[in-house]
Image (cartoon, coloured by chain):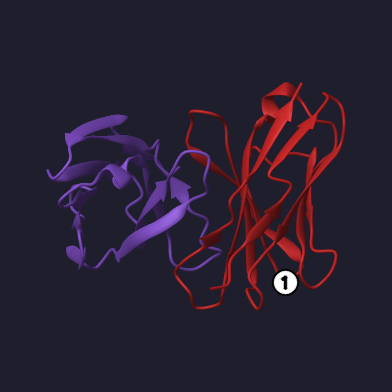
Chain colours: A red, B purple
Amino acid sequence: EPEVTQTPSHQVTQMGQEVILRCVPISNHLYFYWYRQILGQKVEFLVSFYNNEISEKSEIFDDQFSVERPDGSNFTLKIRSTKLEDSAMYFCASRDRGDDEQYFGPGTRLTVT
Amino acid sequence: GEDVEQSLFLSVREGDSSVINCTYTDSSSTYLYWYKQEPGAGLQLLTYIFSNMDMKQDQRLTVLLNKKDKHLSLRIADTQTGDSAIYFCAESTEGGYQKVTFGTGTKLQVIP
């Protein structure tokens, strides 16, 4: 069964460093999403992406964040200058047109020290 | 904005039924979901219901929706230790790009 994959599973970085979180959505899916979950808190929407552009973003998704689909298979989330409060689990999701379900990846745990 | 609330913790004995409750505020919600998250794992969609339905049953899972009160529940029959996890209620609205708004999650502990 096709699934969303994410790499790495755990990333440790120092404050101020740039990080890129990678996702491979399900092939042929058209809508892509990033969510984050700070430890012990709810899962929060960050951004949705369709037709090679951001379709919606939350207040969390400020200028420090960017997303890209550099080729036909990868979907990346970049944090330019990480802060301690960026430490969280980041989930990628994808959805096909006409499908009600978003398929979530296993997540990348980001630890900023 | 949209808000989804759940109780934080539920403890049941193995073999009993579990009922996890959720309330939401967005009257335009079209889809209401239940996700399961096991320790260290991702989000697994268990089931979902359209807002024009009152009930959906899927094996041991029963979802009840009271649209008037904006109340959603998930009943797990014959709860097993493998059901121990965090359960997230979530909603999205048809149209647009369907971002999902999650609740706070309910930690279900099943006692053998």
Q: Residue at x 67, y 29 (%)?
A: A87
Q: Nearer the viewer, residue B90 or A22?
A: A22
- In this rendering, the answer to whether B109 lies above or below A45 is above
Left or right of B5 on screen, residue B63:
left
Q: Secondary structure at mark 1?
A: loop
- Residue that sits furthest to the front in the current view: B112
Q: Quadrant of the C terminus of chain B?
A: top left
Left or right of A68 on screen, residue A36:
left
How far from the left and from the top, in percent, is residue A98? 50, 78
How far from the left and from the top, in percent, is residue B37? 43, 45
Left or right of B79 on screen, residue B104:
right
Q: Residue at x 70, y 35 (%)?
A: A110
Q: Chain for mark 1?
A: A
Residue hosting label 1: A51
For mark 1, does the 10 Å Cα neighbourhood hold few (<14), some (14 to 19), or many (20 or more) residues?
Answer: few
Residue A58 visible in this rendered orientation of the protein: no
Q: Quadrant of residue B104?
A: top left
How far from the left and from the top, in percent, is residue B34? 35, 53
- In this rendering, the answer to whether A23 lies above or below A11 is below
How far from the left and from the top, in percent, is residue A103? 53, 63
Q: Residue at x 19, y 65 (%)?
A: B57
Residue A83 visible in this rendered orientation of the protein: yes
Left or right of A19 on screen, residue A4:
left
What number of labels is visible? 1
- In this rendering, the answer to whether A34 lies above or below B9 is below
**Three-letter residue code for mark 1:** Asn
Q: Residue at x 74, y 46 (%)?
A: A8
Q: Quadrant of the N terminus of chain B?
A: top left
